[in-house]
Image: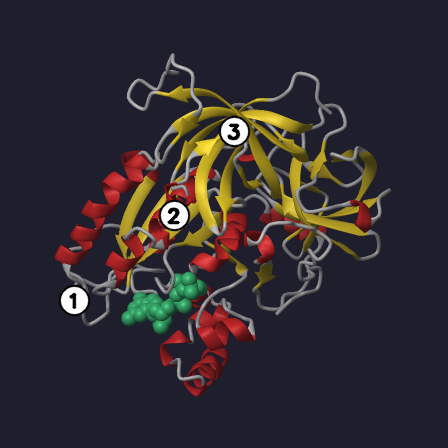
Amino acid sequence: MSFFFFAKNSKDDVTLNSKEVQAESKDKEVSAPRDIETPDEMEEDNKKRHLNVVFIGHVDAGKSTTGGQILFLSGQVDDRTIQKYEKEAKDKSRESWYMAYIMDTNEEERVKGKTVEVGRAHFETETTRFTILDAPGHKSYVPNMISGASQADVGVLVISARKGEFETGYDRGGQTREHVQLAKTLGVSKLLVVVNKMDDPTVNWSKERYDEIELKMTPFLKSSGYNVKKDVQFLPISGLLGTNMKSRMDKSVCSWWNGPCLFEALDAIEVPLRDPKGPLRMPIIDKFKDMGTVVMGKVESGSVTEGDSLLVMPNKIQVKVVAVYCDENKVRRAGPGENLRVRLSGIDDEDILAGFVLSSVAKPIAAVTEFVAQLQILELLDNAIFTAGYKAVLHIHSVVEECEIVELLQQIDPKTKKPMKKKVLFVKNGAVVVCRVQVNLICIEKFADFPQLGRFTLRTEGKTVAVGKVTELPSVSN
Ligand code: GTP
Ligand code: MG
C-alpha cells in the first residue's frame, strides 16, 4: 500500500456531540505502490478526464468484491497477492471473501467481512481516470457512506440477485433505498445499477430474475429523482468471477445479454463539465501536518494552482498554496472534480477542521449560522412529528453539525409542487416543507449556485430522516 503522501484521517479533534456521528467518516487508501511521477508526466495524464465513482448498496451486495475485481482486472493486483488473500480468507472461514480483501484492508473488516471505512482506489480505462470509493453497506456506517457519496459524481449501485438478498436489501430498513436517496441528494448524478451475483446457483444468469429486479427498481429510482432513461443504466455481472466486467461476456455464459460490460458502461458515462474558471471551492475532508499543513478534499468549483493565495473559510485565514498533489502525483494545477492534497503555508493544522472550505479570495464562500431550505421528510423516528424545535445532525458536503429547525415556513403541495396557502406548524413523513435552519457557523452555498455545496441530509440516531436543498442564505454573510 502506498501511504506516501497519504495519512490516515485524524478527526479526533472534530468534536461532534451526537451519537450517530461517533462512527466517524474515514477513508482508507487502497493502491499498489507506484513511483511518483514528475509533474510533466502528470500533465500528460491529465488529458484523460477524471471521475469519482462511489460503490453503494446493501450490506454484502458485493461492492468490495466488485471493486477488488476491477483492480485485479486492470492489472493492479498480481496472482500472488490474490493467492495470499485466498489463504487468509480461508483461515478466517471466509473463503469467498478474498476479492473483497483487496478493498477491505483493515483487520476488523476482514474478520467481519464488512467494510467500515470508505476504501479508495484508482484505475484507468481508455478515456478516463477513475477513483473508486467503496462505501460500507452496513447501516451503522451510513455516515461513512455519506462521506463517500458526497465526493462522487457517479454511483455504482450494487444489487445482489441471490435469492432473498435482493428482497432484504430492497425492503424497508434495507440500505438499497436509503443509499439511492442519499446518493441523489448528495449530488451523484448518474447511476449504474449492477445486478451482481448472477453466477450464484439460485440465479444462474436467469433473465427472469434480472428483469424482476430491473422492474422493481425502476419506479423507485424514478421516485428518488433519477431520470431512468437518461441517468441510469442496468447491467448484469458477477463481481466474484469478473464476468461482464472488463470485456463483454460470452453467449455461452449468458445468451440474452446484448448490452455493454461494466468498463464500457463506465467509460461511456457523461457528466456535466464544471467550470475550471469559477471561484474556487474545495471542502476540506481532512488535514495533517507534513512539511507545513496539508488539506485533503475534492475541488467542487474552480482550480488550484501552486502559488495561489486563498482563504480558509469560515475563519478567513489567508493561505498560500505551496504544492498540489493529485493522487500520488505532484501537479502544478488541478481543476474541478479532482481529489487533492494541498500543502498550505500561513496556517496551522490546528486551525482547520473537516467541513472548512478552501476558497477563492475574490469570491469567498458564504459562512452562515442560519439558512432557508426545502426539505423532503423521509422517515421520522417512530412517526415523530416534524416541527419547530426539531434537532438533527446536518451532513452537508464535508460538514457534520448539529442543527435545529427554528421555523416551518411553507409546505409544498406534492402534486403541484407549489407552496400551500395554509400556515404550517408540523408535518409528517413524506412531506416537502420549506424551513429555517439554525446551526453553528458553517460554509455552504445555495443549491441553485453550487449544487454540491447546497444539498444535505438530516440524520438522527443513525437514521436519515430528511434530505434537503439550501434555497436562501442570509443577505449579509461572511
Ligand atoms: P459490505 O462492505 O459489508 O457492505 O459488503 P459488500 O457489498 O462490500 O460485499 P462483499 O464484497 O464483502 O461480498 C459479500 C459476500 O458476497 C462475499 O461472500 C462475496 O464472496 C459474495 N459475493 C460478492 N460478489 C459475488 C458474486 O458476483 N457472486 C457470488 N456468488 N458471490 C459474490
Ligand atoms: Mg464492502
The three-letter code of the residue at mark 1 reads Ser
In primary-sequence order, the first of circles 3 and 2 is: 2
Place of residue 49 in the rendered image (x, y in percent of width and height, measured from the top left): 52, 43
Does mark 1 have its CB less than 8 Å from ligand 1? no
Query: What distance separates the C-alpha of mark 3 from that of mark 2?
Result: 25 Å
Q: Nearer the viewer, mark 1 or mark 2?
A: 2
In primary-sequence order, the first of circles 1 and 2 is: 2
Secondary structure under tag 2 reads helix
Residue denoted by label 2: 178
The C terminus - image quarter: top right
196 and 440: which one is in front?
Answer: 440
Number of the label disc, if any, that sits on residue 53: none
The three-letter code of the residue at mark 3 reads Ala
Q: Nearer the viewer, mark 1 or mark 3?
A: 3
Residue denoted by label 1: 252
Secondary structure under tag 1 reads loop
For label 3, count other residues whose C-alpha is less than 10 Å away and answer few (under 14), some (14-19) or many (20+).
Answer: some
Residue at the image point whose x is 29% and y is 36% from the top: 222
